[in-house]
Image: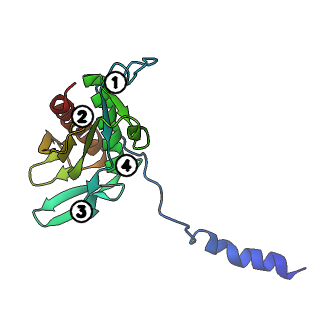
Amino acid sequence: MKRTPLLLVLTLPLAGCISFGAAPPPSLLTLEPTSEIAVGQVRSTAGARTVQVQSLTVAQALATPRVPVQATPTTVAYVKDAVWSEPPARLFARLLGDTLSARTGRVVLSGAQALTDPGAQLGGDLRAFGLDATERVAVVTYDATLIRGQSTIVQKRRFEAKVPVGTIDAASAGPALNQAANQVATDVADWVGR
């Protein structure tokens, strides 16, 4: 019985040394569409064309929730405390879907839904989604692929937006990347069309 208090006293100093993971960042980044769908608006494939936004491929530097910084042409680092709420490819694909729906009137379908109504298919590679320290800009580069309707012809086009950033930090990264992502999504929606 006397040993229990002694063991507790001896283990208390260790409590401050034990860590079960990295400290969480102060906040998480996300994307907010500038073109929004009205709440309660019904979309139907009976009166509108469809589009499916497929999963985007990304380089390994973007397959993480961290925000990459192109420090030199051959060096990538990450912005301290800048962490996405989900992988950038998923966030950008959702932003594309919202922007396409709002700007074109198309019904955006998931993979399973597209089996019943195979409209246009939009996919591609998210090539850049981070900061460039040499130019001091946020960069979003998307190589889009598009198959229109029942066609077997694949169209490919590169979209890019650069937004200036004052400093390379978490506070600047989120708003600048959101603006660049929305600009690219708007350009893609205009290309896909109604």
What secondary structure is found at the residue carrying circle 2? helix
Name the residue carrying label 4. Answer: 84
Q: Earlier in the sequence, mark 1 or mark 2?
A: 1
Whole-number angstrom distance, CA of label 3 to CA of label 2: 24 Å
Mark 3: amino acid: Ala
- Note whether residue 21 is visible: yes
The quarter holding residue 41 reads top left
Name the residue carrying label 2. Answer: 182
Q: Quadrant of the N terminus?
A: bottom right
Mark 1: amino acid: Glu
Q: Earlier in the sequence, mark 4 or mark 3?
A: 3
Q: Which of marks 4 and 2 is in front?
A: 2
Q: Which residue is drawn at 20% across and 63% down?
A: 76
**Are the two marked residues, 4 and 3, in contact with CB atoms closer than 8 angstroms?**
no
Q: Nearer the viewer, mark 3 or mark 1?
A: 1
Whole-number angstrom distance, CA of label 3 to CA of label 1: 33 Å
Whole-number angstrom distance, CA of label 4 to CA of label 1: 21 Å
Name the residue carrying label 3. Answer: 77
> Could you say where residue 147 lies in the image, as x and y percent from the top left?
21, 41
